[in-house]
Amino acid sequence: MQINFDKVNSFKEAMANYPTGVTVVTAIDEEDAPIGLTVNSFASVSLDPLLILWSIDKRVSTYEAFKKVDKFAVNILADNQAEIASLFASRTSNQDRFVNCDWDLSKYKLPIIKGTMATLQCKTFKQIEAGDHTILIGEISEITVEKKRPLVYHGRKMEALPENFHEN
């Protein structure tokens, strides 16, 4: 199949202008080391059972490790965590990522980033191959939520949701 680069560029531009929240998905790999990456392809799926999804590019360094995990955490970043999003989006090693952020291991043995707006700890429910990505669906085991403003991705930038966003 021939790639239509005009269409690909238009798609990228459209998606960059679609505002999303910013998450860091974390897990423990087969060698008991923490892994994580920044993800904005995160969405709710179902209330019964409680399911969410995110997708991972098959070309990222942690792809094979995430394909093998049976549980993961979605850390929904707070407005003051743009540096963490950038850290986990960089080509830095996973060891360096976790050394440079504040995190704990949960009772489910998942890396939880401190200071987030919310964290969803999930069991892997299903994986679906979809083009150059794999969609991972998780069934939520535990949720923690803090009263914080989210970090938002829009126009290839990460910013805090404006304080006046919910004013009448």
Image (cartoon, grey):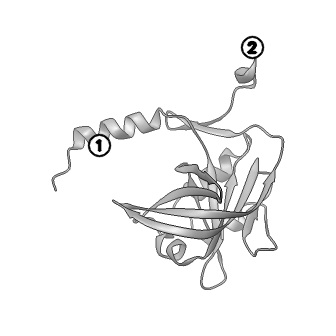
Q: Is residue 126 left or right of residue 158?
A: left
Q: Residue 144 at x, y = what percent?
A: 80, 55
Q: Residue 3 at x, y = what percent?
A: 20, 50
> For residue 168, which numbered disc appears in the image?
2
Amino acid type at mark 1: Val
Look at the picture and state if 62 lies above or below 87.
below
Q: Secondary structure at mark 2?
A: loop
Q: Residue drawn at (40%, 34%), measured in percent from left and top?
A: 14
Amino acid type at mark 2: Asn
Residue at image mark 1? 8
Q: Earlier in the sequence, mark 1 or mark 2?
A: 1
> Around disc 2, counting alpha carbons within 10 Å, would you say few (fewer than 14), some (14 to 19), or many (20 or more)?
few
Q: Residue 102 at x, y = what percent?
A: 78, 61
The C terminus lies in quadrant: top right
Q: Are marks 1 and 2 in contact (CB under 8 Å)?
A: no
- Give the spatial CA distance, label 1 vs label 2: 38 Å
Q: Residue drawn at (84%, 41%), measured in percent from left and top?
A: 147
Q: Quadrant of residue 130?
A: bottom left
Q: Quadrant of residue 11?
A: top left
The N terminus lies in quadrant: bottom left
Q: Nearer the viewer, residue 46 or 30?
A: 46
Look at the picture and state if 29 lies above or below 167.
below
Q: Residue drawn at (60%, 64%), measured in percent from left and top?
A: 138
Q: Residue 91 at x, y = what percent?
A: 51, 62
Q: Quadrant of residue 25?
A: bottom right
